[in-house]
């Protein structure tokens, strides 16, 4: 009976931690701030590693052992960073990590044509995320919550409207 209770409790905790990723709507800024502060140590470990590497571009996904950096696959050399990445991905906190020169972007939620990021710029500027339609400063200095909605971005940039005046969406 004790093992069943522990299993149920662990399952409940795991599902609760992933709650923001299972919603149909992007998470609120409050949810994102909580997600950041609840996982700050692991996020900071990965961001410090990415910011201090000589590679200009990096993609880290659920492999947790390697990264795609400057057009080649490279093993992540630091076990502490590997463990932090694995922890964040296994918990469903982060989907993938990106670095593009001075910008570090972490996908926290995604649906077709919409992605939500937490983003940081190592040079102090507001991060420039592709197709960003909203950037909100987070409670942690230098961090931004960015919503990137391709259809909304395209409509804002081109004024592309359907015959009824509503934005045209792509399949």
Image (tube, rainbow, N blue to C red):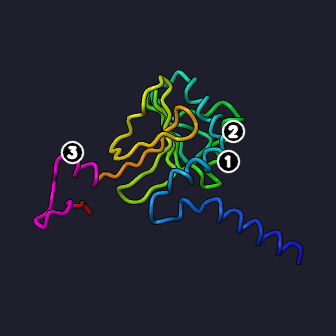
- Determine contact: label 3, label 1, CB under 8 Å: no
Q: What whole-number distance in Å separates the C-alpha atoms at marks 3 and 1?
A: 36 Å
Q: Is residue 76 left or right of residue 95?
A: right
**In the current view of this chain or complex, which residue is farthest to the right?**
2
Mark 3 vs mark 2, CA separation in Å: 38 Å
Is 157 part of what is drawn in magenta? yes
Residue 82 placement (x, y as % from top left)? 66, 39
The magenta stretch is: 152-168
**Element under disc 1:** helix
Q: Position of residue 70 (x, y in %)?
A: 45, 29
Residue found 57% across the figure and 40% down from its top: 139
Callout 2: helix, strand or loop? helix
Viewer-closest of 66 and 167: 167
Are dots 3 and 2 in contact, CB under 8 Å? no
Label 3: element kind = helix
Residue 5 quadrant: bottom right
Residue, disc 1: 38
CA neighbours of label 1 inside 10 A, class few (<14), some (14 to 19), many (20+) = few
Identify the disc placed on residue 41: 2
Q: Which mark is residue 157?
A: 3
Q: Earlier in the sequence, mark 3 or mark 1?
A: 1
Q: Give whichever of discs 3 and 2 has the lower sequence position.
A: 2
């Amino acid at each position: 009976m004790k093992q069943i209770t522990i299993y149920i409790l662990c399952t409940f905790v795991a599902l609760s931690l992933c709650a923001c990723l299972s919603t149909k709507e992007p998470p609120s800024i409050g949810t994102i701030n909580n997600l950041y502060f609840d996982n700050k140590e692991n996020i900071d470990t990965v961001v410090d590693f990415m910011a201090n590497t000589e590679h200009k571009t990096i993609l880290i996904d659920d492999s947790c052992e390697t990264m795609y950096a400057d057009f080649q696959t490279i093993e992540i050399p630091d076990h502490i960073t590997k463990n932090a990445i694995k922890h964040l991905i296994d918990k469903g906190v982060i989907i993938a990590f990106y670095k593009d020169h001075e910008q570090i972007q972490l996908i926290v939620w995604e649906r077709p044509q919409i992605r939500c990021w937490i983003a940081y710029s190592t040079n102090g500027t507001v991060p420039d995320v592709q197709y960003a339609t909203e950037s909100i400063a987070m409670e942690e200095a230098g961090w931004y919550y960015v919503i990137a909605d391709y259809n909304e971005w395209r409509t804002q940039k081109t004024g592309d409207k359907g015959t009824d005046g509503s934005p045209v969406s792509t399949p």
